[in-house]
Image (cartoon, helix red, strand yellow):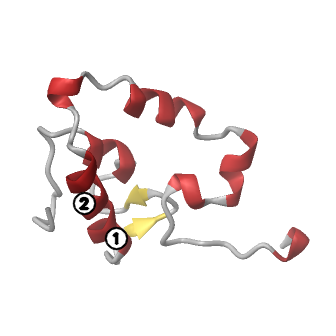
Amino acid sequence: MENNQRICYRCLTYEMAENKDGKFDNLRALINNIPDDKKTAAGLYNERLAACKSCDYLSDGMCRACGCYVELRAARNFKDCPHGKW
């Protein structure tokens, strides 16, 4: 590991060191461009992400159960957790 950065498997993409090079800019753009009527309210979005962060299936910002980026799935009010956590 370079610069003593730790690898965080149970992190969201915006928390990961790799995000500093813009690796997840497209993901952020997708989330920001979700129409308001399809976007999860901010408080509920944060609750959903908190549930994902405590889940054993989270790895590098992705759900190992379904393969989604959890930040994108949680941002859509018409999606749910494949394991019923939210």
Q: Please, what secondary structure does the residue beneath circle 1 have?
A: loop
* Looking at the image, residue 17 lies above or below residue 29: below
In the image, is 70 to the left or to the right of 14? left
Q: Position of residue 59 (x, y in %)?
A: 46, 66
Identify the image quadrant of residue 21: top right
In the image, is 46 to the left or to the right of 59? left
Quadrant for the C terminus, please.
bottom left
Measure the C-alpha gap from mark 1 to mark 2.
14 Å
Task: Judge the density around disc 2: few (<14), some (14-19), many (≥20) Cα neighbours within 10 Å.
Answer: many
Residue in the foreground of this view, choosing between 25 and 62: 25
Q: Residue at 48%, 35% (x, y): give it.
A: 27
Residue in the foreground of this view, choosing between 16 and 39: 39
Q: Residue at 25%, 21% (x, y): give it.
A: 35
Task: Judge the density around disc 1: few (<14), some (14-19), many (≥20) Cα neighbours within 10 Å.
Answer: some
Mark 1 or 2, nearer chain start: 2
Q: Which residue lies under the disc numbered 1?
A: 57
In the image, is 71 to the left or to the right of 27? left
Identify the image quadrant of residue 34: top left
Q: Which mark is residue 48?
A: 2
The amino acid type of the residue labelled 2 equals: Arg
Q: Please, what secondary structure does the residue beneath circle 2 have?
A: helix
Camera-near label (1 vs 2) is 2
Q: Check if mark 1's residue and mark 2's residue have beta carbons within 8 Å.
A: no
Quadrant for the N terminus, please.
bottom right
Q: Residue at 27%, 70% (x, y): give it.
A: 51
Q: Position of residue 25 (x, y in %)?
A: 59, 34
Residue farthest front in this picture:
43
In the image, is 60 to the left or to the right of 6? left
The amino acid type of the residue labelled 1 equals: Tyr
